[in-house]
Image: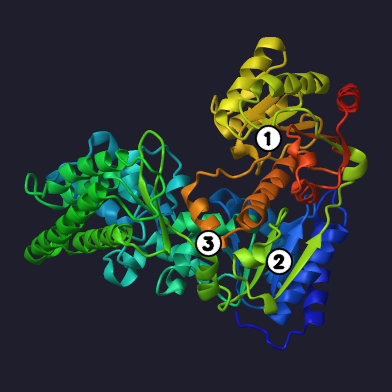
Amino acid sequence: MTAEPQQTPEDWRRRAGDLLGSVVAAMPHSEPRPGQARMTDLVATSFAERRHLVIEAGTGTGKSLGYLVPAVCAGAPVVISTKTKALQNQVADSDLPLVATATGDVSYAVLKGRSNYVCLQKLDEALDVTAQQFEGFGGEVLEELRQVRDWCTTERIAEIERAPFPLSREAATQLAAGTDECPGRKSCPRGNDCHAERARDRARESSVIVINHSLLAMALATAEPAAVVPLGDYLVVDEAHELEDAIADALTIEMSGAVITSLMKAVTRFFEKGKAPRALFGIAEELDKAIAAVKQHDLPDGVPPRLSKVLTDIRSELSRLVAAVEKVANANPAAQSRAVRLRQRIDSLTFSVTTLLGDDDEWVRHVTTGRRPELRATPLNIGSFLRDNLWPVCTAVLTSATIPTNIVERLSIPSRNVRVEKVDSPFDYENNSLLFVPRGLPDTGDRTAAVNPVILELMEAAGGRTLALFTSFAAMESAAAFCRLHSRIPVLLQNEAPASELAQRFAADEATSLFATRTFFQGVDIPGRTLSLVIIDKLPFPSPADPVLKARRALIGPAAFQELDVVMCATDLAQAAGRLIRRTTDTGMVAVLDGRLLTKNYGQTLIDALPPMHRTDDTGVALAFLREIAAG
């Protein structure tokens, strides 16, 4: 498709408005939404004027159609970036077909990272070489791979997770080739048949390309972004409040003994049996021990001496490994393609080690906690990364139901070429919902003895129908144990079943409550009476000990608490509260069991981020409100 530079803002708005009307008219039980129409108008204007747009679209706006409709009127490809692969599928499976039906000529594609698609070259090698000659997997895995080979002959684009039969982790590993080992179409014997390349070909031929934030980050970090994602003139970033962290996570370097061991398993299969270099296996164990010995999780002065020595040894062994791989490849032309892929993995790992050993302030080096600690390096300033690599490339629309107030500054969007707008939710929060903030609860320390009885009393008044959200697992487990002991209302608990199963069970039974942590702050859509009460046990401020956030605070300076912590808390609080009202007929209450919302100078900032609910601090009023809903 070719762009239409002659298209004026008025033409674009008119075309988008007409199309939105057609789409809405074709939807069963749908009514025009003023906010959706305004969003469509704003997005069309932004694209036509080549001006970035940040738009907060309140819950119920219908923001997906609000940006998809003007996007298909672009006359040029538009990239849609979402937070997760699940959201990609939702846009492609639910929303885009509605627009495509109304227009009749919209082509669209979902594009994911390379490792999501079956690598035919790795599959060939596993079946024809590795399994017979080298250390590896057993007959069950071989049978799975043979099934995949047969399935691939029927699929134009084969995604590993869409295989019509179960796959073991070991089999899936043999099928996936990430960007750190894929040599590309021109250098791969199966390049012309490659499923990842076919997915990119389809994307290049499409009007709308749906990707995720991680893939966007990988594209922007490469020398040739178009080889990863065909970015054009227009981009929509959905769930834009997640963009900074999603890109930081995608670009984060992770190092542990498991990373080295994974490489060495591939190395073992490359060499003849018994001839593979073994030194790195021992160094992998030393690496895990050196990481575990680090007492301070943030490393502002770089990695400590013991860990530095291990990393230096790894880099030296990687250099020797490259020479050994090239020697085998030179002697055996049949091993060339595997050698190229293995060399890429070694080069990628060498870059990671070198970055971790560096002392520049562009990366935050830190050690994770948990059963298996990792050494990591996370880019500090995502805003400068986007300023240099994204904003000059395309016109972007950033949207979410909750937009951080300082997103323009945080992401370094050019202030002279951005418009910030808000489209209010169509829901009647003032009449259909209540915000309850009790006074007198402790702000700090172990709050469970004071908070748990309040949770029980509210849940009993609501007759179940409660989504209780906690800022820690310890608080969640304490409250669940207390309520299970003192109430007959069934309490579902995060981690006792998969998240999707818990949500389904909760939605199916009004007299049930669900207790969860930040995992359920967003993405949970349960309309109707089954969710009448959202409890938030404590203001969701980010951890003061998080190494990346500590570095960001240091970069910001004295204003860091207001500009970083309060803004992040406001965004998370609004996301959590947004679980309550999902349809125009919904009613209910949000209870924030943290008096700081009323007593601290930042409290009004947090309240302003919430929907315009009627507020009370009177427990009697709150209980009466819940009992009325339960009786209705």
Whole-number angstrom distance, CA of label 3 to CA of label 1: 27 Å
Residue nearest the observer in this picture, 240 or 358: 358
**Which labelled disc corresponds to residue 555?**
3
Apparent side of residue 402 relative to residue 248 in the rendered image (left or right): right
Q: Considering the numbered disc 2 on the image, is that residue within a helix, a strand or a loop?
A: strand
Residue nearest the observer in this picture, 115 or 386: 386
Instruction: Identify the image quadrant of the N terminus.
Output: bottom right
**Which labelled disc corresponds to residue 538?**
1
The residue sitting at 65% across, 41% down in the picture is 540
- Of tags 1 and 2, the one toward the viewer is 1
The residue sitting at 12% across, 47% down in the picture is 279
* Residue 459 found in image quarter: top right
Residue nearest the observer in this picture, 206 or 181: 181
x then y, percent, for residue 107 = 61, 67
Q: In the picture shown, does residue 505 fall above or below 332?
A: above
The residue sitting at 68% across, 62% down in the picture is 406
Q: Are marks 1 and 2 in contact (CB under 8 Å)?
A: no
Q: Which residue is mark 2?
A: 54
Apparent side of residue 169 relative to residue 433 in the rendered image (left or right): left
Whole-number angstrom distance, CA of label 1 to CA of label 2: 29 Å
The outermost residue toward the bottom is 6
x then y, percent, for residue 106 = 66, 68
Q: Considering the numbered disc 3 on the image, is that residue within a helix, a strand or a loop?
A: helix
x then y, percent, for residue 590 = 79, 35
Instruction: Identify the image quadrant of the C terminus.
Output: top right
Apparent side of residue 181 relative to residue 599 in the rendered image (left or right): left
Q: In the picture shown, does residue 205 fall above or below 303?
A: below
